[in-house]
């Protein structure tokens, strides 16, 4: 069953009750999901910090967002006195369209300010805007104190050649990249979100949520196959959701 959601309903629908420091990994919607969650949590009254432990494009267009672009405890405190939504990053490059790329504050600084916010949302790896990725040797980088990891996959990868859409192929921890199907299929994606060489890399007891995004691109057969696989993950005690962040839709 497909259900639309309002932004403020998203944290509960994703099972994030009790989560406080959330690192997002993978590809195909990390920034979109982080922005939707940031808007929801802050609107619900939580002091929300949006940041990165690697690199991110400076967030724009989020209502009430104040950006802090230096490691300054006083500046972060002052920002939270004025708003529930603070973005934190260190400018490192200028991008097209007057956008700015942020690098991570030091992990020590992130740990130092962790009590300033009720919720911390952190982008923990990069994907060069490709819809699916394999973590490289130095990835992911979890925000200090992470209690929840969200691993994303963009379903626009289905049916496409792996060399065109799979980030990290040449540098991954996959035991044998030659067995990755070409084109990419649903069984591979279900493995990707459950394997220690995939999006569960580095998990040591943190809550893990697998999110398949871009569900609006699925045909009925693909939707049925993925829903069946997602239910098996849930039956085995895992957390898994199929969504279209673009359309604010979730498949129950």
Image (spheres, grey):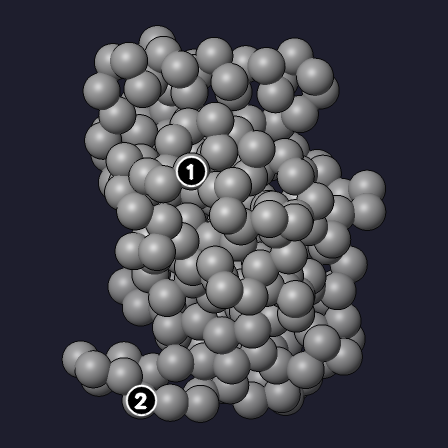
Around disc 1, counting alpha carbons within 10 Å, would you say few (fewer than 14), some (14 to 19), or many (20 or more)? some
Mark 2 crowdedness (10 Å alpha carbons): few <14, some 14-19, many ≥20: few
Residue at the farthest right position: 204
Between 55 and 179, the one lying in front of the other is 179
Image point 70% across, 17% down: which residue? 236
| Residue tagged 2 | 94
Q: Secondary structure at mark 2?
A: strand
Vertical side of 59 occupied by 9: above or below: above
Q: Residue at x 38, y 73 (%)?
A: 57
Residue lying farthest to the left in this orientation: 97
Q: What percent of the width, then of the height, locates residue 45?
A: 53, 47
What residue does disc 1 label? 181
Residue pictured at 81% horizontal, 42% vertical: 205
Q: Nearer the viewer, residue 248 or 66?
A: 248
Determine whether, in the image, residue 63 is placed left or right of residue 190. left
Q: Residue reaching furthest front?
A: 178
Q: Residue at x 74, y 53 (%)?
A: 202
Residue 53 position in % (x across, y down): 60, 71
Side of 116 relative to 44 (left or right): right
Q: Secondary structure at mark 1?
A: loop
Foreground of the two, 48 or 218: 218
Q: Earlier in the sequence, mark 1 or mark 2?
A: 2
Residue 189 to residue 47: above or below: above
Spatial distance from mark 1 to mark 2, Cα to Cα? 37 Å
Whether residue 128 is visible here, answered yes or no, is yes
């Amino acid at each position: 069953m497909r259900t639309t959601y309002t932004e403020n309903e998203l944290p509960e629908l994703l099972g994030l009750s009790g989560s406080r420091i959330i690192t997002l990994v993978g590809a195909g919607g990390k920034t979109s999901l982080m922005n939707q969650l940031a808007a929801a949590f802050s609107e619900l009254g939580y002091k929300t910090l949006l940041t990165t432990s690697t690199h991110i494009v400076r967030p724009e267009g989020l209502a009430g967002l104040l950006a802090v672009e230096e490691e300054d405890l006083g500046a972060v405190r002052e920002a939270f006195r004025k708003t529930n939504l603070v973005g934190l990053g260190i400018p490192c490059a200028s991008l097209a369209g007057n956008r700015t790329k942020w690098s991570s504050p030091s992990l020590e600084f992130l740990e130092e300010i962790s009590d300033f916010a009720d919720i911390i949302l952190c982008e923990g790896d990069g994907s060069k805007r490709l819809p699916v990725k394999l973590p490289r040797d130095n990835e992911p980088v979890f925000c200090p104190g992470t209690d929840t990891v969200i691993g994303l996959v963009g379903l626009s990868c289905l049916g496409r050649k792996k060399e065109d859409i799979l980030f990290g192929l040449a540098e991954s921890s996959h035991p044998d990249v030659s067995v990755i199907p070409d084109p990419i299929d649903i069984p591979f994606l279900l493995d990707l979100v459950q394997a220690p060489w995939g999006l569960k890399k580095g998990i040591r007891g943190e809550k893990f949520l697998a999110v398949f995004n871009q569900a609006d691109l699925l045909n009925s057969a693909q939707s049925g196959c993925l829903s069946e696989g997602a239910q098996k993950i849930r039956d085995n005690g895992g957390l898994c959701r199929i969504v279209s962040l673009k359309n604010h839709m979730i498949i129950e």
